[in-house]
Amino acid sequence: MAEQRVLLITGASTGIGAETARQAVARGWRVALGARSEDKLNELAGELGEDNAFAQRCDVTDWADQEAFVAATLERFGGLHALFANAGFGAKRGFLEETPEQWRSMVLTNVLGVAYSIRAALPHFKDQNSGHFVITSSVAGRRALPGSLYSASKHAVTAMGEALRQEVAETAIKMTLIEPGMVDTPFFDNPVSGGLKAEDIARWALHALDEPAHVDVNEILIRPINQPT
């Protein structure tokens, strides 16, 4: 029997992360679920079954949390084949909006959190000369938006993904950036009309993970129909 693959997901408690976990388990993966919301994580892990999933609180801005999450995944499942760096949140547009404290938290989560996720898993992936990083960026990481520090943070994530791809280009490690347009998830305070669904993004993340070993899908840009920019 082929080895059951293991996927670690940050930002796994709701939205894209949670739906990716559901679809991954349906495709035969085992999943490690990380987020700050322990109640939601434990509920999702219970839904997926203890043989398929485990939950661990992980604040992606805390290096010790990220190291411990990868170590716990390896201890629980005996391997790690892919990491989905999905944790992140946004802010109102306008450089006079939000608070400096909110900005700091967003930038640390969206940028440093992704870098920590990469650093936590990369030694293991290099040791086994395989592995796959999937990183959530955004359409906003491809073009500047008026007054958007969120957009700037996602530009950093897009650059980080390409920098990682180049660093591991001589290995069998893969890197995929997922760049969604408008998605109806708890990311937004109010429901989004006409947006993509979390399951749409999850489906493409799994598509990239399921490609043959010689295929490295580096960017997936997904917009809902009728989103002009």
Image: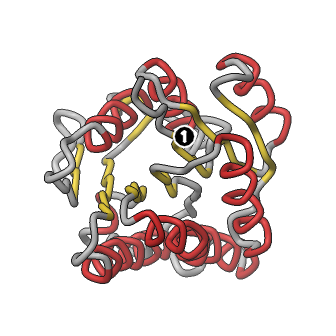
Label total for image: 1
Q: Residue at x 55, y 60 (%)?
A: 90
Task: Kindly state the secondary structure of the residue where label 1 is placed.
Answer: helix
- Quarter of the view holding residue 131: bottom left
Q: Quadrant of the C terminus?
A: bottom left
Q: Residue at x 21, y 43 (%)?
A: 227
Residue 44 vs 114, above or below: the answer is above
Q: Position of residue 143 (x, y in %)?
A: 25, 71
- In the picture of the structure, the residue carrying the numbered disc 1 is 17
**Extreme residue in the front direction:** 1
Residue 90 vs 111, above or below: the answer is above
- Quarter of the view holding residue 60: bottom right
- Quarter of the view holding residue 51: top right
- Classed neighbour count for the residue bearing mark 1: other residues with Cα under 10 Å, few (<14), some (14–19), many (≥20): many
Q: Position of residue 49 (x, y in %)?
A: 70, 18
Q: Position of residue 150 (x, y in %)?
A: 48, 69
